[in-house]
Image: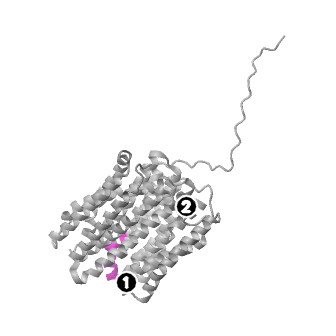
Amino acid sequence: MSDTRVQTPLPEAPPAPDRNRPAPAPLLTPTGLLTVLLGAALPMIDFFIVNVALPTIDHDLHAGPAMLEMVVAGYGVAYAMLLVLGGRLGDMIGRRRLFLWGLASFGLTSLACGLAPDAWSLVAARVAQGAASALLLPQVLATIQATTTGKQRAKAVSLYGGTGGVSSALGQVLGGLLVSADLAGTGWRAVFLVNVPIAVAAWLLAVRTVPETRSPYPSRVDSPGTALLAVTLITLLLPLTEGRAAGWPLWSWLLLAAFPFAATAFVLVERRAERAGRTPLVPPSLLRIPSVRSGLSMIVPFSIGFGGFMFVVAVALQSGLHYGPFAAGLSLAPLCTTYFIASLAGPRLVQRFGRRVVLAGSLIQGAGLLSLALTVYTGWPDVSVAGLAPGMAVLGVGQGLLLPTVMRVVLSELPAAQAGVGGGVMVTTQQSGLALGVATLGTLFLALLPSVGIRDALIAALVTQLVIVLGTTLLALRLPRTVR
């Protein structure tokens, strides 16, 4: 008699885990996203918050023009110089860990700035603060890239871009408010001391809400590349930011002459490292990704114009129109507000119109600059905060549509393993452009002052930025038609 019982198949054994495949990163919660954006806002605010405090710092510390330039430049040069290294270290040893270290260091160096007894101590503390910012900021974009996908990532990147623009304008608004309030007699020191409780709060939130991520294939630090990048940025940014105030001494011309050689050496060393199978600090292959290349080519001129605008406006309003620190900061509030609103609307507009959002943003930005130039030309010296508001508002709309979208373009095709270094390269490009803007447009403005006066020097700076915007508009045609 045959056995007709049904043979129940044994369940298949689960596949053996792939030990070489990294576990997926936890998703970033809304509170975690808010925390990393708060961490990103701190160094961005601090780049600009000092602008409206410079006259008071000069008065209290007897700093002089050259030292004041170093207060601004020391932070910016250290920040730009170490950003890519900060991104690489986060890829290696953990982005959450570097984020926490960066927050702690930023809080401590802010305290040192606020307690500085003299100008040289303030400059040293600002350099250290820039280095702390370089540890902190690259981890934000890398964490967003590693812990979000699809629409959530698009929204998070747009919020990051919006945070950048709003923080830049908010820095000068907040700086003016704090200097004017003179809390407990702290004066300009409050613009640095305010960072301490915020950094503590962000640190406590980050411990609970930010997931740990790192590159699945971490690599060693590229020491030759790091050193050459530092030399390249110093030979360019230091003489441009300090040369005019120091009277263009010999050392400034020698550094500028060394810049092309340092830049060439950096490129050659990075190419050789990648060909040899090592991981360079800035992989040349990263720049061969079309979205990265076209996006970075727009970030450079945008940042130059934006950095120069913020510096020139802060000086012109206080020195020419005799605004107090609070009024000078308040004049940027319309820009801050419309920038944030436009950056929130950006993701939906990009889904429908693609790169045309960037083109529209660039043209609207140009219209805002033209409006401000006409307002200054026709109304000087009786230009009020309310009179500047329409031009500032239009300018904010254009910039809010442009920058977050371009940042999203740069990050759209980055491999997850290169999230940290890619974010570091993008932010280094942005910060270097901001410093170049202060140096170039600021130098143009200050050089014209003795011969043409503040009004015409300001108009010349605005028209120069308008020309830069026209170039940015043409570069937008190279962006991908659709934005992921």
Q: Position of residue 74 (x, y in %)?
A: 44, 77
Q: Position of residue 33 (x, y in %)?
A: 46, 52
The residue that label 2 is drawn on is 285
**Residue at the image position 34 percent from the left and 79 percent from the top:** 57
**Residue at the image position 58 percent from the left and 56 percent from the top:** 214
Q: Would you call the spot at circle 1 few (<14 residues within 10 Å), some (14-19), or many (20 or more)?
A: some
- Label 2: which secondary element: helix
Colour theme = one colour
| Residue 428 in sight in this render | yes
Magenta-drawn stretch, dominant element (helix, strand or loop)? helix
Tell me the magenta residue range.
48-62
The residue that label 1 is drawn on is 66
Report the Cα–Cα distance between label 2 and label 1: 40 Å
Check if residue 216 falls in the magenta segment: no
Q: Nearer the viewer, mark 2 or mark 1?
A: 2
Check if residue 56 falls in the magenta segment: yes
Q: Position of residue 272 (x, y in %)?
A: 61, 69
In the picture as drawn, the residue positioned furthest to the top comes out as 1
Q: Amino acid at mark 2?
A: Ser
Quadrant in which residue 375 is drawn: bottom left
**Residue at the image position 39 percent from the left and 73 percent from the top:** 436
